Image (cartoon, rainbow, N blue to C red):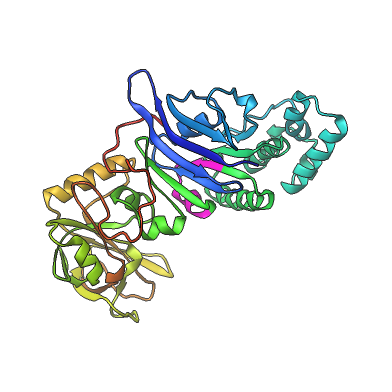
Amino acid sequence: MAKIQMKNIVKKYGDGFPAVNDVSIDVADGEFVILVGPSGCGKSTLLRMIVGLEDITSGDMMIGEKRVNDLAPKERNLAMVFQNYALYPHLTVYENIAFPLRLAKAPASEIDEKVRKASKTLELDEHLDRKPGNLSGGQRQRVAMGRAIVRDADAFLFDEPLSNLDAKLRGQMRTEIARLQKRLGITTVYVTHDQTEAMTLGDRVAVLKRGVLQQLATPRELYTQPNNLFVAGFIGSPPMNFLPATVEGTTLSMPFGDVTIPQKSADRAAGKGLLIAGIRPEHFEDASVAEVGEGSTFRATVDVVEWLGNEAYAYIPFEAQPEVQEQLTQLERDLDGESMRTQLVVSIDGASRITAGEEADIWVNAEHIHLFDPSTGENLTKEGKVQANEQATDTGEPAAG
């Protein structure tokens, strides 16, 4: 096992645009780090530079204490798992797992020991004599993982390994990968565009946009303390609500009325003029059924209600100023078309009797309201030190994925 250090990594192609732009990430020995972002953010390019499949324009790639920029992939001792499995259809499961060991001319006894140990770990013992064509998608991906395990690599690299599986199988494989990584304790870098995978698997998550690192933090910090508008909009489902707002004293004025916010938030937003207020759907509630604490209540007309049993989503339309609408439109493009329409999505208790077309009293937890600068996307109310690349602004250049 070994730590991986990416120091000011830049990748430019022939047209001069940076696919990866001055990214620095340290992956500790045994840590599980996720690279996540929409298509074209540079996450796969960064992973390919770690393994040596892409040349590095500038910066240093360190594995252990060794600079590996000029080393061929086979000299880096890394194991990579791809999304398309890349299994040999004419070989059995046993021989597919054993393949890298046979290439290395390992003794037959060592090959058998490692293959059987890996197959036991991955629950493939009863399938060792079968061909890949007779396996399910999840079983094939486990075979690909087994081939990586037997190599005794310094680190695992995963390139969207679950994207070809159906939703139920993805959930099962997520759990298996998490258990396997904890059991082996091996340094792991995992690329995905799926925020659910990112939030459930990673010790830390690096969010990228147009080749620029926006934030590197634990899943909890990304969710509760996003650096900027992009991270806030990307993390969370349904996504965070964004509304035009102004602050005077501790009063936050939004399209639905006024809310009293904490003094520390008011101080950070003082004198900023028009702002974007970010509020997650779960920080609202139907005031008529919930036992609410500190916060404010406003009255609004509900447009649509989606009842899901234990909870429901109420949709409330509103209008936004051109400056705010411009930012939301740009954010929608950055998020691969994720809808950022001017409507409030409110998560309410399933016992609520709110119906479409009626007015309702909605409670909001003001402690969890974020305030963003419309011109830069910066989170003005984020607590603590920003844990992101110094260039993690909301103005990165376009990049290839």
In the rendered view of the protein, which quadrant contains the N terminus? top right
Q: Residue at x 40, y 68 (%)?
A: 311
Residue at horizontal 40%, vertical 42%? 37
Q: What is the tally of numbered marks visible in this picture?
A: 0
On the image, the x and y values in percent for residue 315 come to 27, 61
Q: Quadrant of the C terminus?
A: top left
Which x, y percent locates residue 280?
A: 32, 62
Residue at (12% x, 52% y) in the render: 321
Query: Looking at the image, can residue 40 be seen?
Result: no
Q: Quadrant of residue 66?
A: top right
The vertical placement of 289 against 155, above or below, is: below
Q: Position of residue 28 (x, y in %)?
A: 56, 46
Residue 193 shown in magenta: yes
94 sits to left or right of 57: right
* In the image: residue 299, left or right of residue 379: left
Residue 154, magenta (yes or no): no
In the orientation shown, which residue stands out farthest toward the top? Answer: 14
In the rendered structure, the answer to whether residue 80 lies left or right of residue 97 reads left
Q: Residue furthest front?
A: 65
The image quarter in which residue 275 lies: bottom left
The front one of 123 and 228 is 228
Vertical placement of residue 57 versus 115, above or below: above
- Magenta segment, which residues? 189-200
Residue at 69% x, 27% y is 89
Residue 10 shows up from this direction: yes
Task: Report whether 273 appears left or right of 317.
Answer: left
